[in-house]
Image (cartoon, rainbow, N blue to C red):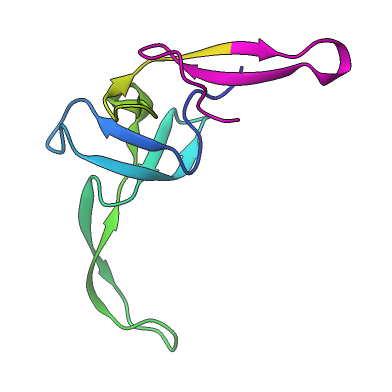
């Protein structure tokens, strides 16, 4: 199945403590149905000191369920659902993502 949300996409959080905030997808975990979003769902973790890493309490992103994220529409930045459309004919045929809200192509 084609991915509706991919690494590098701008997304909006629909539910939870970060509702309404936007961020860029850092990593998608399709088997877990989750994604990491920059600056969203921050948690504090204790880090042991090593030769390369300073010890202490660090903040990092935790995974958010994909159902709680919506892609930001490329035209107005509001949340939108994602559809697919085929462009071209024959061997040049290409499947692209389309914003349901405005009809704009997400990836060219």
Please check the rendered image and state whether residue 87 is part of the magenta-colored stretch, yes or no: yes
- In the displayed structure, 28 sits above or below 95; it is below
Say which of 84 and 16 sits in front.
Answer: 84
Say which of 37 and 87 sits in front.
Answer: 87
Say which of 25 and 32 sits in front.
Answer: 25
Residue 79 left/right relative to 18: right
Residue 90 % position (x, y): 86, 11
Farthest right residue in view:
91
Residue 100 left/right relative to 107: left
**What residue do we see at 46% from left, 29% from top?**
5
Image quarter for residue 101?
top left
Residue 46 % position (x, y): 24, 68
- In the displayed structure, 50 sits above or below 30; it is below
Residue 97 % position (x, y): 54, 20
Q: Which residues are magenta?
A: 85-108
Residue 26 % position (x, y): 43, 48
- In the displayed structure, 96 sits above or below 85; it is below
**What residue do we see at 56% from left, 13% from top?**
84
Q: From the image, which quarter does the N terminus lie in?
A: top right
Residue 46 left/right relative to 17: right
Q: From the image, which quarter does the C terminus lie in?
A: top right
């Amino acid at each position: 199945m084609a991915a509706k949300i991919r690494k590098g996409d701008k997304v909006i959080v629909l539910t939870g403590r970060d509702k309404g905030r936007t961020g860029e997808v850092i990593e998608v975990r399709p088997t877990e149905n989750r994604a990491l979003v920059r600056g969203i769902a921050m948690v504090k973790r204790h880090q042991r000191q090593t030769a390369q890493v300073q010890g202490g309490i660090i903040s990092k992103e935790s995974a958010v369920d994909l159902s709680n994220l919506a892609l930001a529409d490329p035209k107005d930045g509001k949340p939108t659902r994602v559809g697919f459309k085929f462009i071209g004919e024959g061997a040049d045929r290409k499947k692209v993502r389309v914003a349901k809200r405005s009809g704009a192509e997400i990836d060219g």
